[in-house]
Amino acid sequence: MEANPSTDHTWPAHKWQQRIEQQPLLDIIIERLSPQVSQLALSGPVSEALADTGLPILSDQLPGFVGPLAGLLSALEWADQRGGQWVLSCPCDSPFLPLDLYSTLYEAVQKHHTPIAIARSQERNHPVFGLWSVTLLESLRHTLAAIPQERAIGRWAKQHKPTYCEFPRYRHAISNQWVDPFFNINTREDLHTAQALSCKGHVNVE
């Protein structure tokens, strides 16, 4: 999970500390991801707030903030050191992420024999929500060494012919509104929208 500081200077430094139903965004993401994976880790700068989660914190090994690719590199290295084969990535500002994210992406990489599966919804790709084989480690190291400021995770992923998995929208049980499962909170208005909907009480039908 990526928990880097917000680049929006009108926000607090860590938007994952914002709350929905009195629960911090980060806690919501942990709650939704924990049943899907064997181990969880956070990608971000070491801080007391992150340390309180009790999860491993994977700091970027590259100087400066170079976006999600640097976090993915740290995650792949961490998984490889522990004998892992896959890394599931997601940001810490998407409280509606699917409860079948891993199983759907894993089924796709097995079916299509690809090293990457990327989530998709409403005709948009979401490359920060992906499943990545640790066999990609050397390729990513080479890319970031050759182009240190490469930030586009989707552009790099295309080199490896990823498969894309379509996820349906949620219908909110109370408001009856459709919700994109990869809705992410970038502004205070987004936060208010998520708070109004809450992250509970959805059915997974189109």
Image (cartoon, grey):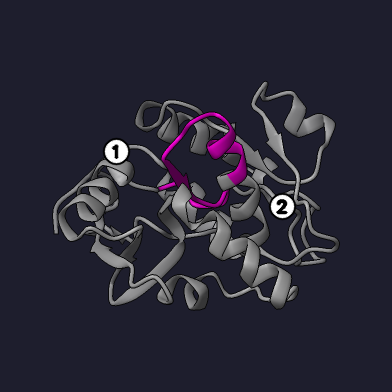
Residue 20: x %, y % from top left: 54, 40
Above-or-below relation of 29 to 12: above
Question: What's drawn in magenta, residue-wise?
Answer: 77-96
Number of numbered discs visible in the structure rendering: 2
Can residue 42 be seen in the rendering of this structure?
Answer: yes
> Is the residue marked by circle 2 packed among few (<14), some (14-19), or many (20+) residues within 10 Å?
many
Residue 107 colored magenta?
Answer: no
Three-letter code, disc 2: Asn
In percent of the image, x 67 and y 21: which residue is there? 54
Q: Earlier in the sequence, mark 1 or mark 2?
A: 2
In percent of the image, x 46 and y 34: which residue is there? 84
Residue 95: x %, y % from top left: 47, 46
Contact between labelled residues 2 and 1, with CB atoms less than 8 Å apart: no
Indicate the secondary structure of the residue bearing disc 1.
loop
Identify the mark at residue 140; answer none if there is no mark. none
Name the quadrant containing residue 150: bottom right
Identify the mark at residue 201; answer none if there is no mark. 1
The residue under label 2 is: 4
Indicate the secondary structure of the residue bearing disc 2.
loop
Three-letter code, disc 1: Gly
Q: Quadrant of the C terminus?
A: bottom left
Can residue 187 be seen in the rendering of this structure?
Answer: no
Q: Quadrant of the N terminus?
A: top right
Give the left or right position of residue 29, taking residue 24 as reference.
left
